Amino acid sequence: MKLKNIITTSTLAVLMIAAAGCSKEKFDINSNPDAVTDISVTPSVLLPGALQSTATNVVSEWWFIGWWMGHGARSGSYQSLNEEETYVFTNDFHSAIWTGLYANANNYNIMINKAKEKGQGTYEAIGRIMKSHNFQILTDVYGNIPYTDAFKGTTAPTPAYDKSVYIYNAIFADLDAAIVLLNDAAATDVAKNPDIKNTDLVFAGNTTMWKKFANTLRLRMLVHLHNGIKTKSVAAGVDVAAQVAKITSDGFLGAGESAHLNPGFSGTKPSPYFRIYNTSESGTGSQRDYLRASAYAIGYYKGDGDPRIDKFYVAPSAGHKGIIFGTPASATAPIGSALSTVRGEGLSPDGASSRAWILTSVESLFLQAEARERGILTSGSSASSLLTEAITESFVWLGLTATDAQDYLDYNAGYPDVDYSAGALASGLPVGGLYTILSQKWFALNSIAPYEIWTDYRRTEIAYGVGGGYDKGPTLSKDPNRTKTSIPVRLFYPQNEYNYNGLNVGKEGTLDVFTGKLFWDLN
């Protein structure tokens, strides 16, 4: 019998420098992407470095969210990390997220302007899409942020803050503009977009694939506006039907169509995930060597007989074992050598030479499944079929097979964390359907898109159960310093904003990262 738990900026003016490099520098992950001036760059020089910076942010900056979401924890042989575990934060808590995404978005903004001047429609469209990608993450993490004034330099050295709902609508408008360009044969003529097949490290200038990326990003945002499972609601301020109508017939990123890049990663220039979590280019080991598997996640993968456990984690000799998030370092706490690490081969299938990712086909299919289930999308494959495709794609993306995925589905028949058609296992427990889609998304996007799982947590009433790794306060975290009983729903603005843009950030009032919900968070 299967045993299971029940899943019951004024500083922005300083960043007005473009990411670039000569043709050989686009392969150098250790070069400074912000080392040249606006005057010296062209879209073809900007694009590869900007894309690589985006991928590096996606795969390396969000490990602490993975802790909060129950996927990871700290080895008991390492001293506690106070802010991540106690929830007592300073304003500089992971401020590199803000700085990195703004600097990267600025690079795309410069590319947009230069491409527009030169009539390089493909470059301009990619810049608009990728700038939108960065701002979508920024506003979903911080709420109201500088947008309209963000990159005006000395014209607006203390940029005003825009409302999140305004930014959402502005992003949608930028995606509209990108689609118009991508549908314009003259603007996307290869002759007008020099070296696009080489400098576009993601889709080699394929305009159809970029339209699919734009559609998928639009769908991600539309899904974020939808709240709840039992009691459903939709955030105000966006015309959802109008945005759905703008999704082009090209569709979304499908199986085998992830936005990946690999400019030539190797042992001396390792891919971002491998470099951060496994071995750096100097061979000195992981920069995050204290990261281990959460006992919560290990229990769920084992309970479901899920072979993806070996793709997300590396087991010690005694088999997979995790540690409870927040366990204080002590002589009796499980230590690194006894715990599974977050270096699974599914995330770095080719070692240092593995691809980096920006937005995966796996996430895209889960977004489509939820959108179909909620009625955002009203035609095409059913939610159940899309969920099966998403689970299968997760297995294949990690290096397993479609047969492995079907065996997993068969083994878990009747359990609503896996089976879309399952009923409740007991009174008051969830049934399949939407719950299954979000549950499986949690299983599939481990270490791949932690911020997306965090958004699911914030906008729905799902918290994955008794004995879990989060939203249960000091008792289950084992951290004696923990006083808050839930994880944050946003991050603080960086201290530099208070130092140099104090008037504008001050207008946002006193923030409470536990109760200061974003505009789409209605739960």
Image: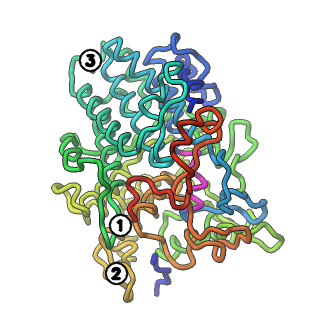
In the image, residue 458 above or below residue 186:
below
* Mark 2 element type: loop
Q: Which residue is mark 1?
A: 228
Among numbered discs 3 and 2, the one appearing first in the sequence? 3
SS assignment for the magenta stretch, majority:
helix
At which x and y percent is residue 283? 73, 40
Mark 2, Cα crowd under 10 Å, few <14 / some 14-19 / many 20+, is: some
Q: Which residue is mark 3?
A: 189
The residue range painted magenta reads: 59-68
Q: How is the image coloured?
A: rainbow
The question of residue 446 being in magenta is answered with no
Residue with the mark numbered 2:
414
Report the mark closest to the observer, 1 or 2: 1
Q: Is residue 472 left or right of residue 281?
A: left
Q: Earlier in the sequence, mark 1 or mark 2?
A: 1
Query: Can you tell which of label 3 and label 1 is closer to the viewer?
Result: 1
How far apart are the two marked residues, 1 and 2, measured between alpha carbons?
A: 23 Å
Quadrant of res 181: top left
Q: Residue at (45%, 63%) from the top-left corner?
A: 457
Given the image, on which type of amino acid does mark 3 rest?
Answer: Asp
Quick check: 280 above or below 65? Answer: above
Q: Is residue 61 magenta?
A: yes
Q: Nearer the viewer, residue 490 or 368?
A: 490
Q: Which quadrant of the rendered structure holds the C terminus? A: bottom left
Residue 404 seen in the current view: no
Residue 470 is left or right of residue 148, and the answer is right
